[in-house]
Amino acid sequence: MTERSSEVRRGAGACLRGLAFCGVLGGLLMGAVALPVVGGAGITTNGVARTFIDLPPSPREDPLPERTVLLDKNGRQFAQFYTENRKIVKLDRIAPVMRQAIVAIEDSRFYEHAGLDIKGTLRALVTNTQAGGVRQGGSSLTQQLVKNILIENAETDAERARAREPSIRRKINELRYALAMENKYSKAEILERYLNIAYFGAGAFGVEAAAQRFFSVSASRLSLRQAATLAGAVRTPYSTDPSLGRQRRQRLRERRDIVLDRMAQVGNIPQAQAEATKRKPLDIRLKPEPGGCGGSPYSYFCLYVHRELLNNPVFGHSRAERERRLARGGIVLRTSLAPNAQRAAQRAISSRVSPEDTEVAAEAMVEPGTGRIRAMAASKRYGRNSGNVRNGPSTTYNLPADVAHGGGMGFQAGSTFKVFTLATALGQGWRFDDGFMTPGRFVPAGGYRDCRGRRVNDPNAEIFNASGEGSGGPQSISTGTWKSVNIFYMMLERRVGLCQVIKTAKALGVARADGTPLREVPTFTLGVNEMDPVTVAAAFAAFGARGRYCRPMAVLDMVERDGTRTTVPPSCGQAIDRGVADAVNHILSGVFTKGTMTGQSIGRDAGGKTGTNNGYTSAWFAGYTPDMAAAVSLGDIRGSYRHPLRDVTIGGEYYGQVQGASLPGPIWVSSMSAALRNVAPSSFRHPDMSRFGGGYTPGLDKLLEAERRAGERRGDEPRSGAPRADEPGGTHARGGGHGYRGWKAKWRRWKAHHRRR
């Protein structure tokens, strides 16, 4: 008996495994008799049966890449990103006519064979062997599925090239895997996998994404005309891509008509229906499917989420694991974004700062008590400028965020940092009216140590008060805050300890925008560190939450492709004493009634601090209520030191100099008023006056008396800077107070005393 007949006998025994496989093997052996050597593959007829009897396991199937979808807090989608635009659907969510169309054109004998269409494959095998390479396609639908799986599994360019190479060896390998898959899955399962993995063109992977992209409908609602069009696109998705012009659409129409004819030939539809459908236009209705954050209406928030997914260990143990997870996608993320707050922030900025301006404004809103970021807006659009020019209406920096979340180097935060010195002083026992005499000029020559105990004095620096802050004189921590007096705060920082102020700031989440260590220098309290609005807003939000600091968060929960839901809880802790926070709130609320923001109000309890940097290099305003905190920054994107905010036109309006109250402040007021319009006002807790009330500042009474008299001569109303009796400064340790009613009582006592004299 010859070796060839011996192989046939062993093959016949293998037929006992199943009639379908017997047909496959019989066909292969018939082909083997005709072809003694399958030349390109180097497989002799002696090895053919063994090759197709000893099958490998079916190929590894990693989860297919899908879209990652971002939802706002109300559940509405505002962004998506993906490596492959795909949404996996079950077979029963795919129109029956679509299933018929793809089978008719790609593998009409799909339900009859066991993974190998013998007639088609042998015909192609003979042709390709004679030609010395692959010239004719004979792949079954299962073989095509295998090829796509191997391409998806490839991790290198070389592996992808091997999965695509036009060789007989590759075809035989696909055949073996196809037979293994037929043993593992039902026909319905194979068809479902194929329709979800196939590329249809125009960036659409899988039939659901293709239906949405080509026709703006779901796969379950595809018509005959639409199904035939998609089925026709699979064979040559690039040359029939309808997004690439009229010529490609004409090729797609030709392919659609071929599919319709084939469906008629195999009995899916009458020929008359095929002819009638062929006379109709394609009716392509391309639906944009932007991937990435550039196409999102809330680009900056989207970019923050994207970077958070890559950076935060909550979403994976390592950076590599997080990158793989993001690339695979299939995740639905519900974020903290509040559309009403986002619109309010964007409108407030856009109405005052133009995208064409080199000065850029950015704002972030954060919810006290949770750290949830509610809005991120900026004056420039996110993306590249036309011609990649450096300065234009767009930017690739995430302006409201730090470098870790796609932002730039940030801007110096200025006097907003005085709140950390204020909180430190109140925590050390200072009272509302405690203070001291200040000079008109200050040199930090001694008394400053960083948190490593090193002297960081700067005898060469000279500190002056900015315009409107006076040339010197007595200041309490209340008046020094309301007027934002630089020298007072430099001296206060020295008294309470530079390191203690830094520790307070760090406890409230303060970190430089560029990720480098904080600059621990005497001017720390004047805001020499570059910051981003998200970080500053989160720090100020802690005061609104009575000292409870929460790390900024953008993702509330995520749903995996298998339906598993993971909730991301807030990460919070008590950063400063509640009573101290109440006291800070009490003083900072005076910024709106008697300080640098006098005359600007949102009609509810609010605290805040302006930030104007030396030389007007940047300007800030940060403020909060118990319900929302926000920080607004402004600076020149070309470089704040080279391009200070002096003699500038911003949003069509000229500014001799930009201060925290002149532009960032109004943006804050406008955005917060709109964002909180439908939120019932909440009140700050009244401070413990037995703990924080009173205090003494030498010479302050006389200064305020002189200011009152000057106001009377001008016919002014009682000075807005004079606190009421129930506010900070309402009572002194020496009695009397300097509220308006207190001043009247002191005035009467003064006159009676002099009459007695």
Image (cartoon, rainbow, N blue to C red):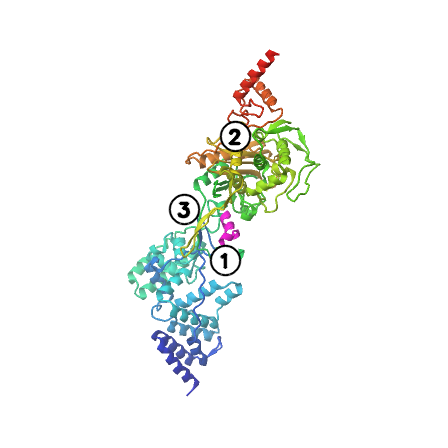
Residue 172 sits above or below residue 282 on the image: below
| Residue at the farthest right position | 460
**Mark 2, residue position:** 689
Q: Name the side, left or right, on which 465 lies relative to 160.
A: right
The residue range painted magenta reads 303-317
Dot in front, 1 or 2 = 2
Q: Amino acid at mark 3?
A: Arg
- First in sequence: mark 3 or mark 2? 3
Provide residue 175's location: percent of width, then percent of height: 43, 71
Categorize mark 1 by other alpha carbons within 10 Å: few (<14), some (14-19), many (20+).
some
Provide residue 680's location: percent of width, then percent of height: 42, 35
Q: Main secondary structure of the magenta part?
A: helix
Q: Quadrant of residue 448?
A: top right
> Is there a contact, CB below 8 Å, between mark 1 and mark 2?
no
**Mark 3, residue position:** 76
Say which element carries label 3: loop
Dot in front, 3 or 2 = 2
The front one of 600 and 657 is 600
Rounded to the nearest whole Å, what is the CA distance between mark 3 and mark 2?
47 Å
Q: Quadrant of residue 655?
A: top right
Say which element carries label 1: helix
Q: Name the side, left or right, on which 170 lies relative to 468.
A: left
**Residue 324 numbered tag:** 1
